[in-house]
Image (spheres, grey):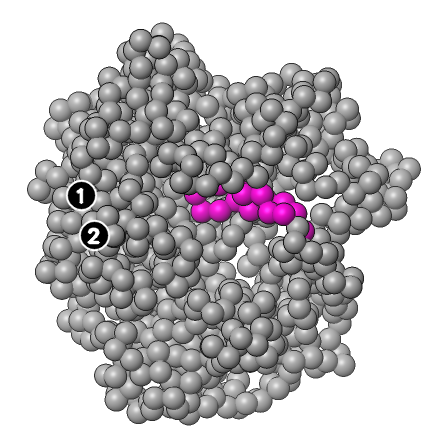
Amino acid sequence: MANADCIIIQGSNMAEAHPVGFQYVVEAKNRGAKVIHIDPRFTRTSALAHTYVPMRAGADIAFLGGVINYILSNEKDFREYVVAYTNASMIVSEDFRDTEDLDGLFSGYDPELNVYDQSSWQYAGQQDEGQEEGEAHTDRETASGLEQESHGPPVPADVPRDPTLRHPRCVFQILKRHYARYTPEMVERVCGVPRDKFDEVCEAWTANSGRERTTALVYSVGWTQHSVGVQYIRTGAIIQLLLGNMGRPGGGVMALRGHASIQGSTDIPTLFNLLPGYLPMPHHRQHETFRQWIDAIRNPEQQGFWANAEAYAVSLLKAYWGDAATADNDWGYGWLPRLTGDHGTYQQVLDMIDGKIKGYFLLGQNPAVGSAHGKAQRLGMANLDWLVVRDLFMIESATFWKDGPEIATGEIVPEQCRTEVFFMPAASHAEKEGTFTQTQRMLQWREKALDPPGDCRSELWFFHQLGRLVRERLAGSTLPRDQGLLNLTWADEEPTGEDVLKEINGFDVATGELLPTFTALKADGSTACGCWIYSGVYAGGVNQAARRKPGREQDWVAREWGWVWPADRRTLYNRASADPEGRPWSERKKYVWWDPEAGEWTGYDVPDFEKNKPPSYRPPDGATGVAAISGDDPFIMQGDGKGWLYAPSGLIEGPLPTHYEPAESTVRNPLYGQQANPARKVYDRPDNPTNPMANDVYPYVFTTSRLTEHHTAGGMSRQLAYLSELQPEMFVEVSPQLAAERGLENLGWAHIVTSRAAIEARVLVTDRLTPLRVDGRTVHQIWMPYHWGSAGLVTGDSANDLIGITLDPNVLIQESKVGTCDIRPGRRPVGPALLELVDGYRKRSEDHGK
């Protein structure tokens, strides 16, 4: 990022939420890079940017779609890159119909399941490879849609292509038609962004992209936490591919993670639908056998490195079950859990309310105030037999039964609450050793600074002891359900952090020798590896993540600081930093290139490509797997080696990003008749109401984000006196115009109401929020931090209580960055009167919609 010529920050307040990483934005700025911040609210990031663009929350695809239209209409794309490295030339089935034809829907929509039969989205001649609507429905329920992008059907070499990009059904032309209506005038109408501001962004982005220059795109949860969050990111990726910014220094799409090891918690996941290294959790109906599971990951005819998935999977099962995993029992595949449907956190809490879940572990999570629809979270946890909470402090999720908001309303009665809570004090990050995996996929080793106090223990200690006790309890059992636990490789003595990292790295089963990289993994059971993408982090018996050579003592790529997956490649897909013949696109942006004399790829970084495969290589007929990757196909994990401008598989709601309004919106969709994402995941229940669209009862847009002084839901920071003094009270920011409209006084009280809850906050009247003109009317937006709750040195209502449960269909993340509300002066009612207020609003909104 420090080497970018322009940096676009959208969906993130990087300066405040990621201040350490923001130093590289400042470094780039000092070198001459232009910095642009696009956000509903003027923040410290905006203050340090050259240009700030205010925008309506939830309208990002309309804005980005306008940028795509600008690029294509003005021929600003990096054409040689686009033709060689993307799927722009591929011809799409003649059965495909776009949103332009169907008023906001794509062909194949099933209105009963609210998903698509994706057959018509495929390339010409490949219609039989598309998912049917039943499969897409299963993928939505299990957050598995994106597996079909990399793990999906093969793309044969003879797919019809038009390298001139003139065929009416080639991806390039479909892209042009799809975004033709996203004009500057439409961007202004939908987003509230003036034409001159929009033009400035387009001109800066395109002028700083191409052979000589690159632009970086930065986002965070301001993009992801939407009912179309995955498509936000896809739209940004399309722009970066069109402009040739992927795989090149100073380019790319940078996902800023919420804190130090969020990236690590998806790599070695805390997600219900994934196994380590993004291997999919098997589904009980789709993957009854080991072979069905493997073939679903690596489709036998597919090209790319996912073709080696059997080696990754077998090595993982050998790490789990050691000698008990044999070829005769399919490496213990029968012991793996199976998906049966939606096992995500929001389905779980609704199941708790319905009495379907008896016990629950909370580990570093505080859903009582940190998750959407806080009331549902607390009522769900109040209906368990037992709850285990591991945390640094006595957080709201451990005490909701005695001090939550529902105590005052009578919805939870402490003497009658059936949940038995076990609080297990946890060690902090400074009191244990191990790795963090941060935003750029870098593993950095953390030394233990001091012993944890009292009974506080690390996760490693807790789970080692828990596993030991459970296995002792089950010893001698012959029940099939218990064999997976009993056959686990479980050390008698507590392992160290380095022991765990070595197992994650992988080793030769016979000799114990640590593996050098993931290409050494075998499918014959001779290797074990806890996470294939991390293989190499302990190469040569050296903890590579512990490397800390100062930057002044090495070159600008700094490869001797930490270790980056996969194979210590600092920039993914960096084969794209060279042209199809292997030459750098320019001397100024030289990064990785082909050395014809040495017969290998070389450069400043580890090449993300087979080292000795020349640019001229073309696969023989019938080749599959790695051998099917041409010498000029840089996107080696894709089924065709190309960057996808158009996604024939992998996305539940469509092959191209399309502007849909948020589930709760103050306006009707100006672009299409289809209002919201037609495939969004909805939990249609009386205890999860959604505010009606364009409803005057909830006339304002709200959004939430974080402060530098507090951490996530505040469980850590509200316990610290200095931070609590800096940000002592829950507050809401409103514009002077909205304050006048609603009679709100600066530093006075206001209460904010949705159909789920009402909360109170101090008022901060500020010009940081600008009223916008959207579709002919004024739209007011309000902003709140989400760090407060009932515990700690400073307390207050939780903004997350306002939010309903509507999810993106691809990954089941909640739409918590935009909703509709009302705001009124004064404090909220308490006790039963609070319920009456919320119910009164809900009934008026229902009457208004009739």
Residue at the spot x=74%, y=27% of the render?
322
Disc 1 residue type?
Asn
Residue 55 occupies which quadrant of the picture? Answer: bottom left
Question: x%, y% of residue 341?
Answer: 57, 47
Q: Are marks 2 and 1 in contact (CB under 8 Å)?
A: yes
Disc 2 residue type?
Lys
| Residue that mark 2 sits on | 34
Q: Secondary structure at mark 1?
A: loop
Count how many numbered circles sit on residues in the image.
2
The stretch drawn in magenta includes residue 445: yes
| Residue that mark 1 sits on | 208
Question: x%, y% of residue 782?
Answer: 33, 75
Residue at the spot x=12%, y=55% of the render?
199
Q: Examine the rendered structure and indicate whether residue 434 appears above or below residue 259.
A: above
Question: In the rendered view of the protein, which quadrant contains the N terminus?
Answer: top left
Question: x%, y% of residue 327?
Answer: 70, 18
Residue 130 in view: no
Residue at the spot x=37%, y=34% of the render?
555
The stretch drawn in magenta includes residue 167: no
In this view, the residue farthest toward the front is 553
Residue 707 in view: yes
State how far apart marks 2 and 1 are (Cα): 9 Å
On the rendered structure, is 337 left or right of 271?
Answer: right
**Label placed on residue 612:** none
Q: Which residues are magenta?
A: 432-447
Q: Nearer the viewer, residue 805 or 305?
A: 305
N-term mark: 2 or 1: 2
